[in-house]
Amino acid sequence: YPGPWRAGGNMRTEVTEGALVEFFNEIRRIRDERVTADELEASKRAIVASFALSLEQPSRVLSFAITSKLYGFPPDYWDSYPAKIMAVTADDVQRVARAYLNPDALQVVAVGDAGRIKATLEKYGTVEVFDAAGAPVVSLTP
């Protein structure tokens, strides 16, 4: 079902540029290379196990019910969810990655010293700077 997709990491300011290069390399690799059978199997098992554990949390069960209502899912959607996850193939992963992971259309959010990382971020598109309270910063110079 629809929803945001996120990837992230924690890095020191001085390695921001290299980290972004590798991040975008990974996005391209996900689109261009088939996932290995072992990695796919491990990921599917992790998703199914996480889903099973989430059923122990009333707030998550409520969230599933709201999602079902919001998107008009059939009554058995969550009952069949684990089987559907386990049926995902490497071709499915690559098809979806190619359809939805566009390195040229990603939004990058970086938290840190804007004066030190802004030039690096500008290589990937327009940069908007905000202060710690969420207010736009007009200029980085005093």
Image (cartoon, helix red, strand yellow):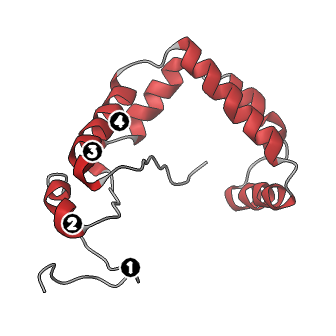
Crowd rating for badge 2 (residues with CA inside 10 Å; few <14, some 14–19, many 20+): some
Q: Is residue 116 above or below residue 133?
A: above
- The numbered disc on residue 20 is 3
- The numbered disc on residue 127 is 2
Q: Which residue in the rendered view is the most extreme toward the top?
A: 37
Q: Is residue 82 above or below residue 109?
A: above
Q: Of helix, strand and loop, which one carries label 4?
A: helix
Q: Identify the residue shown where x is 35% and y is 35%.
A: 27
- Is residue 88 toward the left or the right of residue 65 in the image? left
Numbered disc in front, either 3 or 4: 3
- Is residue 79 toward the left or the right of residue 70 in the image? right
Q: Earlier in the sequence, mark 3 or mark 2?
A: 3
Q: Of helix, strand and loop, which one carries label 1?
A: loop
Numbered disc in front, either 4 or 1: 1
Q: Earlier in the sequence, mark 3 or mark 1?
A: 3
Whether residue 89 is visible: no
- Residue 88 position, x and y percent, is 62, 24
Residue on which disc 1 sits: 132
Crowd rating for badge 4 (residues with CA inside 10 Å; few <14, some 14–19, many 20+): some
Q: Earlier in the sequence, mark 3 or mark 4?
A: 3
Dots 3, 1 in contact, CB < 8 A: no
Residue on which disc 4 sits: 27
- Is residue 19 toward the left or the right of residue 57 in the image? left
Tell me the amino acid under the disc marked 1. Ala
In depth, the one of 99 and 105 nearer the eye is 105
Tell me the amino acid under the disc marked 3. Leu
In depth, the one of 92 and 104 nearer the eye is 104
